Image (cartoon, rainbow, N blue to C red):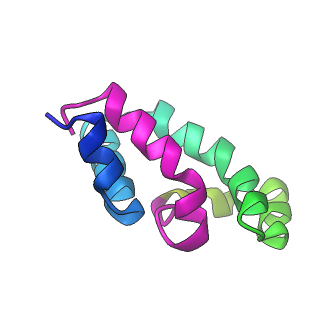
Amino acid sequence: MTTGEDLDKLSTHELHDRAVRRAERHVDVKFFWSLLELIPAAEVASGDTGEADYDIQFSKGLISDALRSGDGALGEALRPVFIDYLRKHPDA
């Protein structure tokens, strides 16, 4: 079991990996869908407006984004989402 404090100490990449692994194990499509919905806004927040425009118009890119959403500025923007998800599902 992972506590909230433990999660805060993890790197964004580790949070991403744990959240994605847990969602994969539990076939948690809702989590992946929420990432897909949040990624364009997170890209704008991280300064990548061109990518956000592309994702909104061409949703195929969102699947790839979900799988790499723990990387770089995008991962940092989504960090609270990974922490929230792992707190709600401490079995990760």
Q: Position of residue 6 (x, y in %)?
A: 24, 45
In the depicted view, which residue is nearer to us: 75 or 3?
3
Tell me the quarter of the picture where residue 47 sits. Answer: bottom right
**Residue at coordinates 19% horizontally, 37% vertically from top-left?**
2
**Residue at coordinates 62% horizontally, 47% vertically from top-left?**
36
Decide if residue 56 is on the left or right side of residue 74.
right
In the depicted view, which residue is nearer to us: 39 or 73?
73
Quadrant of the snapshot with the C terminus: top left
Q: Position of residue 9 (x, y in %)?
A: 30, 54
Residue 44 part of the magenta-drawn span: no
Quadrant of the snapshot with the N terminus: top left
**Residue at coordinates 33% horizontally, 31% vertically from top-left?**
87
Looking at the image, residue 84 lies above or below residue 57: above
Q: Is the magenta stretch mostly helix, strand or loop?
A: helix
Looking at the image, residue 31 lies above or below residue 18: above
In the depicted view, which residue is nearer to us: 49 or 24?
49
**Residue at coordinates 56% horizontally, 52% vertically from top-left?**
78
Q: How many marks?
A: 0
Q: Where is residue 16 in the image (x, y as percent from the top left)?
A: 39, 56
Residue 75 part of the magenta-drawn span: yes
Asked whether the viewer can see residue 64, the reply is no
Query: What range of the chain is rendered magenta?
Result: 67-92
Decide if residue 53 is on the left or right side of residue 61.
right
